[in-house]
Amino acid sequence: MRGIRVVELEIHGPQGPRVIDLDHAFVAVYGPTNSGKTSLSDAISYCLGQKVEWRLAFSKYVTLCVLRIRIGENDYILRRPLGRGGTEIEIFNIGHELITRIPVKSDKHTPGPTFSDWILGELMLKDVIDSDEIRALNSRTARLTFNDVWPYLYRMQSEIDRQIILHAGGRDGARRALFELLFGLSDPKARLLDARLKECRRSATEQERILRNVQAFFTDTGTPPEKSAAEQEAALREMERVTTALQHCRAAITEWEKTRRDLRAQCESAQQAWHRASATLDRARAAQHAHPGNAAHPPQPGQRRLPICCPVCSQEISPERAGPTQCVLCLQKAVKSTPTTVAKQTAPVPMDLGRAEEELTRASTVLTQALKALEDHGATDPEKTRLAVVELTGQQSAFRERIKQLAAGIAHSQRLQELRAGVNAAQEESEHLKHEIATLEQQKGQREQILSEIEERLHKEITKIAPPWFNGSVQLDRERYLPLVDGQSFTQLGGGVKAAINVAYSLALLRHTVTLGTAEKSRLPCFLIVDAIRKNIGSNDVDKEFSARLYWSAFAAGDALLELGLGQVIVLDNDGPPEKVSSTKAFKSIKLTHEEPLIPGVSHADTGEDPLA
């Protein structure tokens, strides 16, 4: 438990700064409407990182708020300007040395610690209500910040007769969770274990859902998971056999096709040789027909060769007369080459008829042999091998698909085993966590005992103020931790009654914390601001006595803090303290008037919002 005390408030207005001394356990601020009372409490709230709906005069004329506070034994100076500069708060020590400049809230552009993190750390609450482990385990849970703590410490004038600590808002769940943490109903370790328990249960539920899907898979396929592995092993062996046979068949077909291509090439070469030999024989016969004596009477050894006719130009050939510019067969000049990419064709030199016939005979024999070899090779066409390849390919595809199905079954089987183990482990961990939480609950103390103590304190506070309509029945709702007075909930009460019960509830929580002293059973900071403590209470004698008792109850709480040496109660109201309180002179009084308002020379009559609040 730590206390907060506002030591001093400094407001920079058009006539310079105004310093307000607030250093006391009980501070009474009073004055007529529109004299600046609410603006004073809003300035304190603003310096503590809260969003404020400013009076128009404040937002128009005030440029800076400086707050000196005491948290525990440490004093700090908080500076927060209005307007655009209000997104950050500067924190100084008592010697005016800058400790840090920290944003009011973080966003994607400015991640990191915020003012809420800093002040929760100073109040020793960060590990309680803002555990990183808890938020990491359950990121969907709204994060608790100092903004959730502040409604416990400040009863706004606009809310005091409408709701208790924002219980009617969208953060009621956060309010209940914070109540449990502040008053020892929920230990941080238990909260962490509870978050882990929820995660284990969620994980077990998800794994059970997947487990049902996997079991449905085996039901649909008709293959039990224990048989999938054996069947896959057999299918893999068959797949290997088929693949090997297929490779042999394809290799045989490839070799046969290669041999056939070679034989066809030999046939084509033999046909070309036969056509050349046939053409040579035709030329030789043509030459014999033109000079029949040449072939019949070849020259004798030692006898001069007789001239023969050139088959090209039909002239006599005289080798002695051939020159470099003449044809090798006749006296005609060689044809000059022309600029073409095609090679010049020269007429083949005809051989004698006998040699031409021999060449043709050899070419015919070679061609006949090549054609015979090609025909014999064609008779070995591997048609059956091709059919076998088609069949084996089909078997290979079927085995591959089956292996794929079996692999999925094996994977599902392994997943099934993992899921079963995961579900069992999650259930075991859940039981273990339940046992640990139960142990912590026993060590922490009885929840009902704590709530009964708070309920008893609330009954004392309401009995002390003695509302005229009170019949003596006070209970604390065990589910929502809100008061039930004479069997009625807060929303069923009247306006003035609501304000009084709200104040009594806040004082009961504060006094419960003070009663525990420095023990760690309650973590609520010892600090309370009540704006318009006697709101909606009538002006007859009975109501005046009732409001005086309510005011005295608040003063008594401040006096208890004074004895404890920490914390503060600040009460704001139109009227000053009642005679019973004034006679003690054990408080600090701040009086505001229209002539001397909070901001000298500025009227507080109009209202408006800070542009950047």
Image: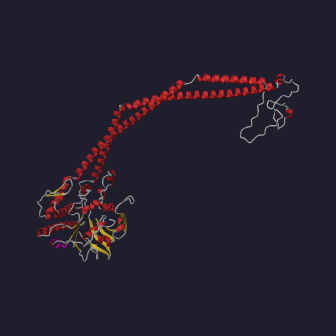
Q: Nearer the viewer, residue 123 or 262?
A: 262
Rendering quarter of residue 604: bottom left
Residue 384: percent from left, percent from top: 52, 24
Q: Nearer the viewer, residue 554 or 490?
A: 490
- Total count of labels: 0
Seen at 85% across and 32% down, the residue is 319
**Considering only vertical position in the picture, is 262 above or below 60?**
above
Q: Which residues are the magenta region?
A: 580-585
User: In which quadrant of the rendered image does the C terminus lie?
Assistant: bottom left
User: In which quadrant of the rendered image does the N terminus lie?
Assistant: bottom left
Residue with the most extreme right position? 303
Seen at 11% across and 64% down, the residue is 468
**Considering only vertical position in the picture, is 432 above or below 294?**
below
Q: Is residue 420 visible?
A: no
Question: Is residue 325 left or right of 131 when viewed as pictured?
Answer: right
**582 is within the stretch colored magenta:** yes
Q: Can residue 258 be seen in this view?
A: yes
Rendering quarter of residue 556: bottom left
**Considering only vertical position in the picture, is 76 above or below 186?**
below
Residue 527: percent from left, percent from top: 24, 64
Residue 114: percent from left, percent from top: 35, 61
Residue 372: percent from left, percent from top: 64, 22
Tell me the colour scheme of the image. Answer: secondary structure
**340 is within the stretch colored magenta:** no
Q: Which of 434 and 329 is in front in this view?
A: 329
Question: Is residue 438 left or right of 117 when viewed as pictured?
Answer: left
Question: Is residue 161 left or right of 244 when viewed as pictured?
Answer: left
